[in-house]
Amino acid sequence: MVNQIRIAILLALVGLVSQWSHLLAQPKINGPEVYGARPGKDFIYTIPVQVRGPFRISAQGLPKGVRLNAKTAVMTGNVKQTGKYAMELTVKATDGIAKKQFTLVVGDRLALTPPMGWSSWYSYGRHVTQEQIERTAAILKEKGLQQYGWNLIEIDDPWARQPPREDTVWQSLKSRKQPIYTYYEGPDNLPERQGSVRDEQGNLVPNRFFPDLKGLIGQLHADGFKVGIYSSPGPITCAGASGSYGYEYRDAAYWAALGFDYLKYDWCSYGAYAQDDSPEEYKKPYRLMSDALRKQKRDIIYALCQYGMNEVWSWGDEVGGQLWRTGQDIRDNWKSVYSAMKNLADKAGFVKPGNWNDPDILQIGTIGGNDGDGEKRKNGLTEEEQRTHFSMWCMLSAPLLIGANLEELDDFTRSLLTNEEVIALDQDALGRAATLEKTLSNGLEVWRKPLADGSEALAVLNPSDQTCTLILNEVVNEPDKEIKDLWKRETVSLQMKKELPAHAVWLLHVK
């Protein structure tokens, strides 16, 4: 009799597991509800489809000039007329069907939600190669990260050649006054990447570690990725490669012809060419490249990288940027990460669709480029701090660029990067950033972020080195609200008591 009961319980459990497995396997369409493109410009966007096995996707209301690959969910095209093109997306797979409303907004603004992807700098630093880029793209697909919206691959410094020591640019830089911050390396720090920096047409020449840049971009596009590139408004990049000074229109045309979708434009040596420290001198090089990008036949998202100088968040939109760095490079320690997020506590007013404060690349997972040596090492942030880091970047509507070396992707890092409900806070169509509402008597910080559906995200952050305790009704006192813990994926009550360890966050959805 006992054995029969055990068998019955076992069969019931097997049935439940089977049922749960089916539910978990249900296809889902992730990503934002809106995407922005400019009229008459080529674009690529991959709809993040979370699914097991093959699928087919269709779009009712697909506008003229746009194609959707039914097997890959890659949307490409060029729409001539401005307007909002509403579609209903449908995904059919072995495990079920999923639908989602989606709007292509053809107008003057790009990046209606913050860019998401991966950057080479904090992984490989000055040793980045085409082979590493290819491996990373394969991992993003194989590990399923692309299904959650990680669809940009940014090739950072130094992909171009470094001018040899005898090039006159080095003496020119040394001879100039530097009224504004200037940084560049060289002339001999990249000996294996030196050579003639431009071809007969004036185009930048990739160094020998990027033997087929055009082929690389073609393959990445075929795999559904946007591709980003890096340069400087000065003649030399931070790592010592050739920049774009004096060749702005030539470089913009070259990148567009190759098919790049994103440009990170890093101040670096340009400080030596600025006339003074007036606001206009900070704006001038970024406005120049913006004008050059706008003349191309391809949408290229424009990321201003100048470390927050002259309050760039107040004028980044004016000079054509879609995102702008708000401080210096961050590091994988709590002081650096917390300072970067706290710096944005009062700057939500500058954030809207197409305008994003960028506190820098995510310090999550195994990294290696912080010192530029590309040597893989363990992250200096604890797992709790990494979870807080990712949570707060999503609360702040920050661009999400993975800095991890994905060849060392572990289960914990993947769990952070594949929580679609947390990512949805960052990708919310309202395009608002969280503000620091108040600090409680025990030091806990309460951050709030409004969302497009009228609900809100709430983050209770413990910046201290001690465990702090909170009862939820101290920060939410509306009994009719449904409250969900986004990391535990469970509903919580107003009477719940929570112990927050040092540097932890309690991330909630309140509706």
Image (tube, helix red, strand yellow):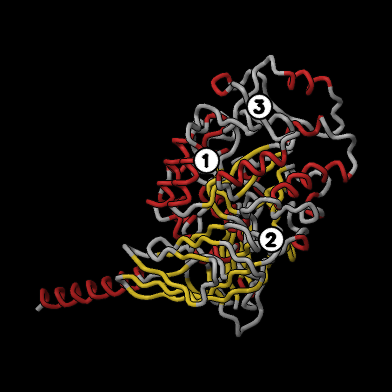
Label 3 crowd (10 A; few <14 / some 14-19 / many >=20): many
Residue at 54% x, 77% y: name it.
493
User: Which circle, 3 or 1, is nearer the viewer?
Assistant: 3
Answer above or below: position of 332 versus 461. above
What secondary structure is found at the residue carrying circle 2?
A: loop
Q: Residue furthest bottom?
A: 480
User: Which circle, 1 or 2, is nearer the viewer?
Assistant: 2
In this view, the residue in front, 485 or 217, is 217
Q: Amino acid at mark 2?
A: Gly
Answer above or below: position of 456 versus 355. below
Q: Quadrant of the N terminus?
A: bottom left
Q: Residue 354: which disc?
A: 2
Residue 381 can be seen, yes or no: no
The picture places residue 407, in percent across and down from the top left corner, at: 42, 41
Residue 393 can be seen, yes or no: yes
Residue at 44% x, 35% y: name it.
131
Q: How many marks?
A: 3
What secondary structure is found at the residue carrying circle 3?
A: loop
Q: Amino acid at mark 3?
A: Gly
The residue singled out by tag 1 in the image is 379
The picture places residue 328, in percent across and down from the top left corner, at: 71, 41
Q: Earlier in the sequence, mark 3 or mark 2?
A: 3
- Label 3 and label 2: CA atoms lie apart by 31 Å
Taking the image as shown, residue 491 lies to the left or right of residue 361, namely: left
The picture places residue 155, in percent across and down from the top left corner, at: 56, 40
The residue singled out by tag 3 in the image is 240
Asked if the residues shown at circle 1 and circle 2 are in contact, with their CB atoms under 8 angstroms apart, the answer is no
